[in-house]
């Protein structure tokens, strides 16, 4: 990915950094060396950079996966997708049979009823799994959970419970579907588990790192984290270890407290950064998700007529928060899914930059799935970067075509081609665990733009393989202001590599996602996938 | 178990006066211990003699009130507050500008230790209709107003009479069923905000209590002294029969045929809570009934409550 030397036969490494890439003779000039030929028949790429993932990718696997698309766990076990509610129930029955503690709650994640044509999961479904222990199924959206009768009993949720998000049947009985933050938190309390706290635990971070390693990723963001002290401690301890394979860039949740407190917290964390841990990034969230119908859309809104989504930050407060962090010298990434959220965010950034000009602030719009050409033109002029959610095209592209966006706007979603053409600095991402962590798959999505059923969305928005590989290395590093350290194989950068069994530039672009990954090298340490030891 | 703690939600956009309102409560001298949960206590003002302690997460006031940061996990914050040796007598949660305040009130509806008190939504008389016409905000404005049990139309001193009338009519068209009150500097009578009967306040410091018409004519209140024991079933029926012009009922009453001699009675909007009174024998029993100026008069109230006296 060094543009002057895109291909080389050898790379020399010293003290965790790259001495150079070239021929053996060229590199021999650096002095005596030990020739390591174990990757002679492999392809060495710059370590891949995942610009939008969550450490939740690690904690999620403590629970049973029941998503629609197949998924590989950090331990390498491949889990088939659940194509129906019955398949979800069958999987949970099997897992339940293996549980030894009779009181332990059974938790599942990734359930995505948007694929099931209106059929909702109900109490009877989950009571087939167990009537004696709580069963909790988290939806892929993260905003809805389903429970069994025991979970409702423990949470004291009955037909008399009168809150908006409690779904009831024609007879007024709860169906087991619980929407909204209050019911969700009650459900977790009733299950006796706190998955939010779990995210910062050491085991979860190890699993996050292994998941990344399997995908050839050597740097990943945790976007975002409240960064409580316990989490910071386990992050600093683990990343200081030579055998920890991942560099983590955690973003602080910039709206969980006042901007002043946020600035103070992040500034106190920056000195605790190390080679594999970089504090300083801030994340704000403007709206919800498109497939959850919570993204903020401009007219004419959702294709199926659903009402407009939710602001997660007051559009009038957004410029103030952005200004506070920006003027404190901190970089901000902003989650914007719908086009209205994107537009309000660009307006806000424009206002902030007018008062405190900075040509290299690298505000980055995360997801930015519905941005229009006009938005990209403004982003290019304002120096705003974008990290597009290319995986959506495959995962929910058909749903966007049929339900959320309708045909025309579905074609312009995650407009990587437009970003490229108009000169916006861009990356592409997985939002793991929302979709699976695998930048080569994400690149495949941006190159082919094929949905799960094989429909091509926005042929003109395709980019070529070289550009897609740039997006998952230097492109993502740029959005993190780490492009001087990582993202390419050249003198002085960190010795971070993805070791592939095949060459992404020569395989059929439709096979890009299938290239086996042998492992990674992080700071010169070699991490083969075959040696991952994880429950 | 102690009587459930009322939880009220204060909603409204930035700049509508939420913080002004909360400042009044936190600095109150009624003896009622409020806990106020806010996103950002940068703007919380403390009367010099009232501050007792300030750490990063909360401010404790000498009057027993506490203001703390909402945090990410409201349920955990509420659980902590309720587990204290001296839990607050009322909790107020400030909803962020764009939040649907109902989602916060849901926490109270789901917790047997909490009583869902009023959802109070503030609107700015100057900007409300502008916001309602802005397609970025209009549906959020509508959702907030739909969630309210009481609307406070604030900053009325900053608009002329025509604008004020037009804004009120616009609000009434949305919510003809709830009280809409016009204020300046978010000055709302304390009794309207507090769900705790004055006689139940932990500190025996009785506030100057308004009878009859409030000076600002925003509300009327009536005090029904109850010395004879009441039948709880009939009392509940009477409360259910009250019209929507009644915003609040609160008090402690003597009861018939129960182990506990006194019961705490609260009505907030349409929510009714009747629970045994665990404190020391109250200095005074009876109900305070608060409503808009068109609420039933004393004679009508007597009729409604007559069945049980
Ligand atoms: Zn995300």
Image: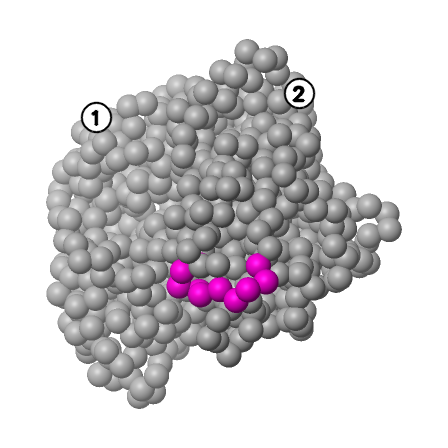
Label 1: chain letter: A
Residue B157: which numbered mark, if any? Answer: 2
Q: In the image, is residue A295 above or below residue A434?
A: above
Q: What colour scheme does the image use?
A: one colour
Q: Residue at x 41, y 31 (%)?
A: B175
Residue A44 % position (x, y): 39, 55
Image spot of residue A337 (x, y percent): 38, 37
Determine whether B196 is above or below A288 in the image: below
Q: Nearer the viewer, residue A300 or B118?
A: B118
x, y percentage for residue A404? Answer: 24, 36
Query: Which is more toward the observer, A193 or A534?
Result: A193
Q: Residue at x 44, y 65 (%)?
A: B231
Q: Secondary structure at mark 2?
A: helix
Residue A517, magenta (yes or no): no
Q: Is residue A170 left or right of residue A15?
A: left
Q: Which mark is residue A300?
A: none
Q: Is residue A290 left or right of residue A396?
A: right
- Closest to the observer, B75 or A387: B75
Which residue appears at 54% of the width and 32% of the height? B293
Is residue A84 toward the left or the right of residue A167 in the image? left
Residue range highlighted in magenta: B226-236
Which residue is drawn at the image coordinates 57% and 51% (left, top)? B224
Callouts 1 and 2 in the same chain: no
For residue B264, above or below residue A48: below
Q: From the viewer's perspective, is residue A174 above or below residue A485?
A: below
| Residue with the mark numbered 1 | A408
**Disc 2: host chain:** B
User: In whole angstroms, how far apart are the C-alphas of marks 1 and 2?
Assistant: 49 Å
Dividing the picture into quarters, in which one does residue A328 lie? top right
């Amino acid at each position: 990915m060094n543009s002057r030397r895109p291909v080389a036969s050898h790379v020399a490494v010293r003290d965790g950094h790259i001495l150079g890439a070239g021929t053996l003779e060229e590199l021999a000039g650096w002095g005596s060396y030990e020739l390591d030929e174990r990757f002679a028949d492999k392809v060495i790429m710059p370590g891949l950079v995942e610009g939008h993932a969550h450490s939740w990718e690690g904690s999620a696997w403590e629970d049973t996966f029941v998503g629609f698309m197949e998924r590989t766990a950090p331990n390498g076990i491949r889990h088939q997708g659940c194509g129906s509610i019955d398949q979800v129930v069958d999987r949970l029955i099997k897992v339940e049979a293996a549980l030894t503690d009779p009181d332990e709650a059974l938790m599942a994640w990734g359930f995505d009823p948007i694929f099931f044509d209106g059929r909702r999961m109900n109490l009877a479904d989950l009571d087939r799994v167990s009537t004696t222990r709580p069963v909790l199924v988290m939806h892929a959206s993260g905003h809805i959970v389903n429970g069994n009768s025991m979970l409702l009993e423990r949470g004291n949720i009955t037909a008399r419970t009168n809150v908006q998000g409690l779904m009831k049947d024609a007879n007024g009985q709860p169906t087991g579907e619980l929407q909204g933050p209050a019911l969700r938190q009650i459900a977790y309390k009733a299950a006796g588990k706190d998955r939010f706290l779990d995210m910062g635990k050491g085991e979860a971070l190890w699993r996050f790192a292994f998941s990344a390693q399997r995908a050839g990723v050597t740097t990943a963001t945790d976007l975002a984290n409240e960064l409580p002290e316990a989490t910071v401690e386990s992050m600093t301890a683990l990343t200081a270890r030579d055998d920890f394979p991942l560099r983590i860039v955690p973003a602080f949740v910039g709206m969980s407290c006042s901007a002043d407190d946020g600035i103070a917290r992040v500034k106190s964390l920056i000195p605790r950064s190390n080679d594999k841990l970089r504090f300083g990034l801030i994340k704000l969230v403007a709206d919800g998700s498109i497939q959850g119908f919570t993204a903020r859309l401009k007219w004419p809104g959702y294709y199926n007529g659903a009402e407009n989504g939710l602001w997660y930050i007051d559009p009038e407060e957004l410029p103030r928060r952005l200004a506070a962090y920006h003027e404190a010298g901190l970089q901000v990434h902003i989650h914007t899914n719908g086009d209205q959220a994107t537009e309000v965010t660009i307006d806000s950034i424009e206002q902030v930059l007018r008062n405190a000009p900075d040509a290299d602030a690298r505000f980055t719009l995360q997801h930015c799935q519905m941005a229009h050409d006009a938005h990209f033109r403004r982003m290019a002029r304002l120096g705003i970067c974008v990290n597009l959610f290319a995986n959506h095209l495959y995962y929910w592209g058909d749903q966007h075509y049929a339900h959320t966006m309708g045909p025309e706007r579905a074609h312009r979603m995650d407009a990587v081609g437009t970003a490229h053409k108009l000169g916006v600095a861009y990356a592409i991402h997985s939002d793991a665990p929302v979709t699976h962590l695998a930048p080569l798959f994400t690149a495949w999505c941006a190159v082919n733009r094929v949905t799960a059923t094989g429909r091509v969305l926005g042929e003109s928005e395709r980019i070529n393989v070289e550009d897609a590989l740039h997006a998952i290395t230097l492109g993502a590093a740029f959005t993190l202001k780490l492009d001087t350290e990582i993202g390419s194989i050249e003198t002085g950068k960190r010795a971070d590599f993805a070791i592939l069994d095949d060459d992404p530039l020569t395989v059929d672009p439709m096979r890009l996602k299938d290239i086996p990954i042998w492992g990674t090298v992080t700071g010169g340490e070699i991490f083969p996938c075959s040696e991952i030891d994880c429950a | 178990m102690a009587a459930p703690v009322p939880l009220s939600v204060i909603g409204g956009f930035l700049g509508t006066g939420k913080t002004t309102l909360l400042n009044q409560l936190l600095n109150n001298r009624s003896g009622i211990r409020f806990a106020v949960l806010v996103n950002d206590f940068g703007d919380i003002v403390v009367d010099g003699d009232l501050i007792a302690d300030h750490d990063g997460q909360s401010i404790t006031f000498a009057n027993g009130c506490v203001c703390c940061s909402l945090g990410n996990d409201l349920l955990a914050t509420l659980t902590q507050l309720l587990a204290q040796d001296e839990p607050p007598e009322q909790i107020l949660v400030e909803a962020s500008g764009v939040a649907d305040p109902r989602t916060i009130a849901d926490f109270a509806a789901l917790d047997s230790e909490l009583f869902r008190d009023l959802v109070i939504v503030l609107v700015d008389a100057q900007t409300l209709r502008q916001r309602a016409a802005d397609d970025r905000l209009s549906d959020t404005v509508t959702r907030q107003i739909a969630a309210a049990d009481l609307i406070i139309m604030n900053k009325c001193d900053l608009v002329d009479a025509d604008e004020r009338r037009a804004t009120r009519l616009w609000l009434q068209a949305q919510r003809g069923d709830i009280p809409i009150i016009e204020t300046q500097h978010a000055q709302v009578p304390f009794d309207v905000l507090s769900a705790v009967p004055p006689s139940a306040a932990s500190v025996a410091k009785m506030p100057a209590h308004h009878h009859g018409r409030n000076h600002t004519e925003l509300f009327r209140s009536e005090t029904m002294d109850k010395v004879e024991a009441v039948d709880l079933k009939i009392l509940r029926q009477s409360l259910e029969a009250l019209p929507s012009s009644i915003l609040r009922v609160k008090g402690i009453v003597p009861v018939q045929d129960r182990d506990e001699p006194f019961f705490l009675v609260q009505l907030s909007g349409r929510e009714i809570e009747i629970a045994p009174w665990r404190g020391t024998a109250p200095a005074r029993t009876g109900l305070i009934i608060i409503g808009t100026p068109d609420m039933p008069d004393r004679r009508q109230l007597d009729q409604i409550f007559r069945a049980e006296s």
